[in-house]
């Protein structure tokens, strides 16, 4: 669980590179019985529940006010907007 949390804090692109190039190289003293990458990946589902519990403990009290980013996402060029309608137009 420590390795998984550290991976998300580091901001690395792939977990495999992080594990093989950082954890195995620099953290071998902290984890003397470090397993191979495929073995570690097979153990990750067992960490999901404690990881979610840890994340939940990091939340602060809810004040009832929530913010949502309403920035529009550009999906297609403006000239194609009328062609890509998901729902029928109601006038």
Image (cartoon, rainbow, N blue to C red):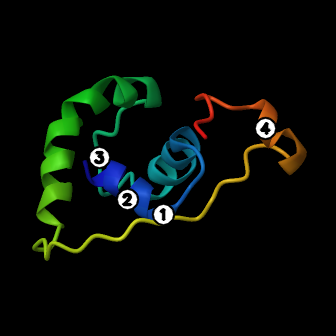
User: Disc 4, disc 1: CB below 8 Å?
Assistant: no
Mark 3: few/some/many CA within 10 Å (<14, 14-19, 20+): few
Residue linked to disc 1 = 10
Residue linked to disc 3 = 32
Tell me the residue at 45%/51% (across/down).
Answer: 23
> Relative to the observer, which residue lies in front, 34 or 59?
59
> In front: mark 4 or mark 2?
4
Q: Earlier in the sequence, mark 1 or mark 3?
A: 1
> In front: mark 4 or mark 3?
4
Mark 4: few/some/many CA within 10 Å (<14, 14-19, 20+): few
- Depicted 23 relative to depicted 42: above or below: below
Q: Earlier in the sequence, mark 2 or mark 3?
A: 2
> In front: mark 4 or mark 1?
4
Residue 66: name its quadrant: bottom left
Whole-percent x and y of residue 65? 22, 74
- Disc number placed over residue 6 in the picture, else none: 2
Q: Earlier in the sequence, mark 4 or mark 3?
A: 3
> Relative to the observer, which residue lies in front, 66 or 83?
83
Q: Earlier in the sequence, mark 4 or mark 1?
A: 1
Whole-percent x and y of residue 48? 22, 37
Tell me the residue at 20%/30% (across/down).
Answer: 46
Tell me the distance, in whole angstroms, between the alpha carbons under discs 2 and 1: 6 Å
Tell me the residue at 57%/49% (across/down).
Answer: 21
Tell me the distance, in whole angstroms, between the alpha carbons under discs 4 and 3: 61 Å
Q: Earlier in the sequence, mark 4 or mark 2?
A: 2
Residue linked to disc 4 = 82
Tell me the distance, in whole angstroms, between the alpha carbons under discs 4 and 1: 42 Å
User: Disc 2, disc 3: CB below 8 Å?
Assistant: no
Q: Callout 4: helix, strand or loop?
A: helix
């Amino acid at each position: 669980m420590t390795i998984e949390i550290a991976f998300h804090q580091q901001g690395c692109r792939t977990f495999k590179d992080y594990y093989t190039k950082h954890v195995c190289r620099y953290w071998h003293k902290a984890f003397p019985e470090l397993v191979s990458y495929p073995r570690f990946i097979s153990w990750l589902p067992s960490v999901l529940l404690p990881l979610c519990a840890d994340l939940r403990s990091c939340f602060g009290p809810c004040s009832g006010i929530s913010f949502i980013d309403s920035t529009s996402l550009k999906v297609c060029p403006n000239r194609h907007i009328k062609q890509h309608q998901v729902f029928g137009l109601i006038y």
